[in-house]
Amino acid sequence: MKAVVLISDRAYPALSGSKVRNLFLWRELRAQGVELRLLGMDLSPKGDSTPLVPGMEAEAFRHRRQILPLRAWNAALYSYHQWPYCKELAERVDELVGSWQPDLVHAEELRMAAYLPALRGKNSRARQTATFHNVESDLILRTGSTALSVAKPLVENLHRRTLAGFEKRVIGSLDRCLAYSDVDLESYRRKYGLGNWRSTRGGASVNEADCAPEITEPSALIAGSLGYAPNVEGIEWFLEKVKPQLDKNIRLTVAGSNASPALRKKITEAGIAFIDRPPEMAPLYASHALSLVPLLSGSGTRGRILESLGCARAVVTTTIGAEGLELAEGEGLVRADDSKRYAETVNQLMKNRDERARIARSGFERVRERYAWKAVASDLKKIWEELL
C-alpha cells in the first residue's frame, strides 16, 4: 500500500495533540509496511532546519506572502482552515499522484484537505481520505476566528459561512471521512447528512520506562498548545475560578507553545511556573504528581490526557475534556465540571498518594491496550485496506 500524507506543520516539538499524532503515527504505519510520502506546510520561522517528522523523509512547503490588499481580503473571508493556501504544495501533490501513483492521498486535518486532488477537480485513481480533528465550524462559534477588532462580528460570520461550505465540499468529495470520536462523527452526520464516516483516535507512546514513581510533593502540570483557543479558555477559567480554591502548598506549572504575552503575564502573576516549548514532556510528567486538563470546549485529539496516562500520571479533567475517550471514571482520570468540584478533586488526590497511583496505573493499562500507537496505526491501516 502506498499513501501520500498531507500534514499541516512540523511535528517537533510535539506540543499539541495533532503534532504528537504526526510524530508517532506515520512512523508506526511505515513500520507496519505502508509506503508513505509526507508533504506538509512549513509554518516555522525561516531558517529552522528541523525535519517535518524526525526520522522520516518529508517535503516542506512555505506559502507565498501576498500583497496587502489580497491578504486583507482573504483574512476577511477565510479562517486559518482555508487560508493561506500554498499553490506549490498542490502542484507537488499532483506530480506525485502522476509519477508515484499512490493508492491513497490522505489529509491530516481539515485545512490540508484543500490539497486533495478530488477537491480541486483533478482526476485520480488514488482513494482520498481525511481526518477531522474537530467539528471546526461548530468550534469557532465558541472560540472565534479572528483577532481583528474592526468589524469582528461581520468577519467571523463570513468565516463561519465559508468554513461550513468548505467542510461540506470536503466531506462530499472524500472516499472516507475519519472523525476523532463517535461524538464528532455523529455531529458531522447530523450537520451535513453525508459522508462515508469511520472513527479514528489519538494515541500515546506507552513505555514502562516513562513511568516514574509517584512523588510526594504536591504538584500539578497543565500542558498543551497555548495558541489553541479552547486551551486558553480552560487555563483562564482555571486561573480565575479553580486556583484560588486550591491548597496553597501545591506547586503549579504550565508548559506549552504559542502563548500570547497577555496569557504569559496572567500565568506568572498567578505564581505559576511557565515553560515555553519544552523539548520533552516525559520529564515534566515525572516531576509532577498530577496532570490537569481543564477544557470547557472543543473536541479533537485529547492527546495530553493519553500522553499523561502513558507516563502513568493521573489526570483531572472535565466531561468535555475527556469526551470521546473510551476511559471510565477512575480509569486514569477523574472528571469535574464546576470549579469547586475541580479544586476539591485536585486537593484530595494530592493528599492521597495511593489513590493517585491506583488511578494512574489503571489508566496506563487501558492506554497500553487501546491507545498505543501500534494499535492506532493498525486500525487506520485496516480502514485503508477496506477502502482499497
Image (cartoon, rainbow, N blue to C red):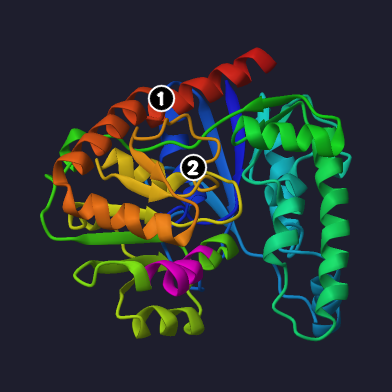
> Is 154 situated above or below 369?
below
Q: Position of residue 18 (x, y in %)?
A: 52, 48
Q: What residue appears at the point 79 percent right and 73 percent down from the top-left corner?
A: 75
Residues in magenta? Answer: 234-243
For the point 41% across and 66% down, which residue is it?
A: 242
x and y percentages locating residue 364 in the rendered image:
28, 33
Pick whichever of labels 2 and 1 is earlier in the sequence. 2
Residue 370, labelled with which disc? 1
- Front residue (pair 344, 143): 344
Visible residue check, residue 281: no
In space, the residues marked 2 and 1 are separated at their CA atoms by: 15 Å
Residue 300, compared with residue 189, is above or below; it is below
Tell me the quarter of the picture where residue 324 sits: top right
Q: Residues within 10 Å of mark 1 (few under 14, many from 20)?
A: some
Amino acid residing under circle 1: Arg
The part of the image, by quadrant, that contains residue 62 is bottom right
Q: Amino acid at mark 2?
A: Ala
Classify the position of the N terminus by image quarter. top right
The residue singled out by tag 2 in the image is 322
In this image, 84 relative to 157: left or right?
Answer: left
SS class, disc 2: loop
User: Residue 215: where, in percent of width, then height?
Assistant: 12, 52
Q: Is residue 125 above or below residue 277?
A: above
Residue, x 55% and y 50% (percent of image)? 59
> Residue, x 60% and y 33% (percent of image)?
181
